Amino acid sequence: MGLSEEKIELSRQQINLRKQDVKYDTRDYVIKYLIEQFNEGEFFIPIEYQRQFIWKQKDKCKFIESILMGLPIPFMFFSDSDDGRIEIVDGAQRTQTLVEFANNDLELNGLTVLDKSNGFKFRDLDISIQRRFLNTNIRVVYLDSGTTIPVRQEIFNRINTSGLSAKSSEIRRGSSD
């Protein structure tokens, strides 16, 4: 016994209506540009729904190590705001870590792959590594200006509250493959 045609139609209409809530494109920003725009206040973190800075030192160092290694970084989500600035919907922890590192306020520690760089700040890296770091592209999902605050909040909540953390055994198994 299947669902009624009416129920299926109502479901289809609702999905089609809600799917139109989000229009976006993708952009690549080099880290140097992200840092400059954030420092100038052109990229900002909305306090209405963003978490406080929760990354610990080890999280920040692991993120920087990933960039230095050339690993892909998860998408950040940005959106136009009413005042013309760019809202960081998701990516606040990463952006603030990039700024902190480039400003020499973060010392790398606990690196496991690039362990020869433990104790380094940005200024201590070879100039070629500094340049490569600052010119690394970060991919951003850029939400259209018509994306409402409730929809941006929903995106943030879904990105940051879904899924389960990997267990230690799963992490070990994944890194040994």
Image (cartoon, rainbow, N blue to C red):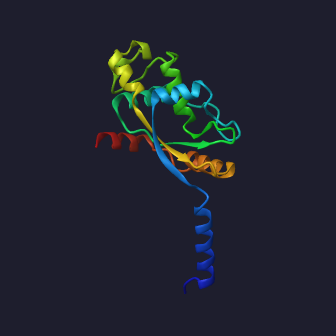
Q: Is residue 114 above or below residue 94?
A: above
The image shows residue 13, relative to residue 78, as above or below, that is below
Q: Is residue 34 visible?
A: yes
Which residue is outermost to the bottom?
Answer: 1
Please give the count of numbered marks on the rendered protein: 0
Left or right, 121 with reference to 18:
left
Residue at 69% from the left image edge and 42% from the top image edge: 82
Q: Residue furthest front?
A: 84
Residue 91 in the image: state x and y as whole percent. 54, 37
Q: Residue at x 34, y 43 (%)?
A: 174
Q: Position of residue 150 (x, y in %)?
A: 68, 51
- Between 149 and 49, the one lying in front of the other is 149
| Looking at the image, residue 62 lies above or below residue 1 | above
Relative height, residue 15 to residue 85 (above, below): below
Residue lying at the far left in this picture: please name it.
Answer: 177
Q: Nearer the viewer, residue 156 or 152?
A: 152
* Image point (57%, 48%), residue name: 143
Is 128 on the left or on the right of 93, as rendered?
Answer: left
Q: Nearer the viewer, residue 169 or 134?
A: 134
Residue closest to the far right = 48
Residue 117 x/y as whole percent: 36, 18
**From the image, which quarter does the N terminus lie in?**
bottom right
| Quadrant assignment for the C terminus | top left
Viewer-side residue, 134 vs 56 = 134
